């Protein structure tokens, strides 16, 4: 079974290392925006004397854990003021940034005295001459190829919006890693679909612990549950505050009156929580594993919740949007052998069927999955809940029995090699297609952002055609590296930039 711990290492070794691509990962849990960045392959290239970042053919941002939000690019740009986050043309950068007499011999000192007024501050230049997207794609991720962004969302306007500056690669990240997170439940008999769950007083299970940001729709859904007097049929985990905001700021409904909050949950079966690094492998036999319920507790399975309910209402991270970003939340009921309805973007059930899962359109109306308007989609889900809740115990049990075969198929399929291989094959195809697209873009812009940045320094910041010895060394160096990669691309770079040809011919 694929290991979540090794996913990034495997990606780097399989697709990026031999291409001289650097991979950046970010771990968003507990944060918002591009924080906790980690760069892979930070070693200095032997004997170069320069930051290895300067010679990467391309940068690859692994944005696969969370949805892409374009406003994060704006925040990222603001974060790097007044420093620029790269070591391109180090001597020119230091000289223009610090405004110092950089050179020691008399000839260079004279030239510096004559020409230092031609310099423009590089930070102000790149902030004013780039958009949020181009700052990220050209300044944050310099290379001779267009940067790649690995994401996990489908039908996304945001992906379309950044495709002119990044090459997107889709991977079903949560599908792959959920199999690892939930692997301990594969042989647990408590997760087998069970007709006796239809007898539970709580017919529905809802996890909606976090309710700010993209999850604010969950409060509206809870309001609807209470308004329709459906709350007695729900088992629900509720937090009074999320991101230091009390729910009363956003709703007049006294939710605590209907859904008392839960301080912690107990888990008697062994689990692994990869995100937090907690491992049940070290748990002693018979020992109960306790943990606080947090907004990222969806990486846990609380089997007692499933044994005491019948149908899960999956409240995904995204709902009020057309982009589909499925997480481990979608796979919780599948692992636990539970039927489900989903609060997610339209087309979610269609995507699940594409990956080989079955849904419950033979049992209840799933046309809500086709409704684009989020309010109407939520109402359609509530209608199905009301119909199921209105059934007598015997009628509900008959309906529930029709779900069991689907639950069993889904559970077996989730843990199957076939599902894993489909996701890995798709990932492989998307990466290889991205490499081809990079080559297509390189025909139009062979120097990429690496040489674009150099050109900006030399023609708009440096504002002179004179090259100091240190500058010549750096520029010849990146030209040699481009030539080592591709003679054809190197020749195209010489035609693209007059100063590159001048250096070679001098």
Image: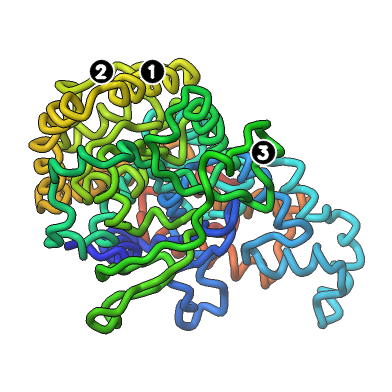
Q: Residues within 10 Å of mark 3 (few under 14, many from 20)?
A: some
**Quarter occupied by the N terminus:** bottom left
- Residue in view at x 33 percent, y 50 percent: 174
In this rendering, does residue 234 appear at all?
yes
- In the picture, measured across the screen, residue 418 lies left or right of residue 293, that is left
| Res. 380 mark | 1
Give the residue at x 40% y 71%.
290
Contact? badges 1 and 2 (CB < 8 Å): yes
User: From mark 1 to mark 2, how far is it between C-alphas?
Assistant: 9 Å
Residue at left offset 28%, top offset 48%: 308
Q: Is residue 391 above or below residue 236?
A: above
Q: Earlier in the sequence, mark 1 or mark 2?
A: 2
Mark nearer the viewer, 1 or 3: 1
Q: Position of residue 482 (x, y in %)?
A: 44, 58
Q: Which residue is mark 3?
A: 131
Q: Mark 1 or 3 closer to N-term?
A: 3
Image-quadrant location for residue 18: bottom left
Q: Which mark is residue 365?
A: 2
Q: Are marks 3 and 2 in contact (CB under 8 Å)?
A: no
* Residue 500 visible in this rendered orientation of the protein: no
């Amino acid at each position: 079974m694929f290991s979540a711990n090794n996913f990034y290492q495997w990606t780097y070794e399989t697709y990026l290392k031999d291409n001289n691509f650097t991979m950046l990962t970010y771990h968003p849990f507990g944060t918002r925006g591009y924080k906790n960045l980690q760069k892979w392959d930070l070693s200095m290239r032997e004997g170069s004397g320069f930051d290895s970042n300067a010679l990467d053919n391309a940068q690859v941002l692994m944005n696969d854990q969370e949805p892409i939000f374009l406003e994060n690019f704006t925040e990222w740009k603001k974060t790097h003021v007044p420093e620029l986050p790269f070591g391109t043309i180090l001597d020119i950068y230091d000289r223009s940034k610090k405004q110092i007499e950089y050179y020691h011999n008399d000839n260079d000192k004279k030239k510096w005295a004559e020409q230092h007024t031609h310099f423009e501050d590089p930070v102000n230049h790149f902030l004013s001459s780039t958009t949020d997207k181009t700052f990220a794609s050209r300044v944050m991720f310099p290379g001779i190829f267009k940067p790649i962004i690995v994401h996990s969302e489908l039908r996304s306007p945001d992906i379309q919006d950044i495709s002119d500056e990044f090459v997107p690669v889709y991977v079903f990240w949560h599908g792959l890693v959920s199999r690892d997170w939930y692997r301990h439940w594969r042989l647990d008999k408590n997760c087998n679909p069970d007709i006796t769950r239809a007898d539970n007083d709580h017919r529905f299970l809802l996890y909606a612990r976090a309710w700010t940001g993209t999850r604010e729709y969950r409060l509206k859904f809870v309001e609807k549950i209470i308004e329709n007097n459906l709350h007695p049929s729900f088992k629900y985990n509720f937090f009074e505050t999320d991101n230091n905001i009390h729910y009363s700021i956003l709703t007049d409904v006294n939710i605590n009156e209907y859904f008392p909050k839960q301080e912690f949950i107990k888990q008697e079966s062994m689990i692994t929580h990869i995100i937090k690094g907690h491992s049940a492998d070290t748990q002693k036999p018979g020992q109960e594993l306790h943990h606080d319920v947090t907004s990222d507790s969806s990486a846990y399975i609380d089997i007692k919740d499933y044994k005491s309910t019948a149908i899960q209402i999956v409240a995904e991270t995204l709902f009020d949007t057309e982009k589909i970003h499925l997480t481990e939340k979608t796979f919780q009921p599948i692992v636990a052998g539970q039927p489900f309805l989903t609060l997610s973007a339209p087309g979610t059930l269609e995507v699940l069927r594409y990956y080989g899962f079955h849904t419950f359109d033979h049992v209840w109306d799933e046309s809500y999955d086709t409704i684009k308007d989020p309010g109407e989609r939520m109402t359609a889900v509530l209608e199905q809940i009301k119909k199921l809740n209105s059934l007598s115990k015997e009628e509900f049990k008959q309906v529930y029995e029709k779900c069991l075969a689907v639950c069993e198929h889904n559970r077996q399929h989730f843990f199957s090699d076939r599902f894993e291989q489909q996701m890995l094959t798709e990932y492989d195809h998307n990466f290889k297609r991205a490499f081809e697209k990079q080559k297509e873009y390189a025909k139009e812009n062979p120097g990429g952002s690496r040489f674009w940045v150099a050109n900006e320094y030399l023609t708009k910041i440096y504002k002179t055609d004179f090259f100091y010895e240190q500058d010549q060394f750096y520029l010849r160096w990146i030209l040699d590296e481009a030539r080592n990669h591709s003679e054809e691309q190197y020749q195209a770079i010489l035609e693209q930039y007059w100063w590159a040809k001048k250096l070679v011919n001098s």
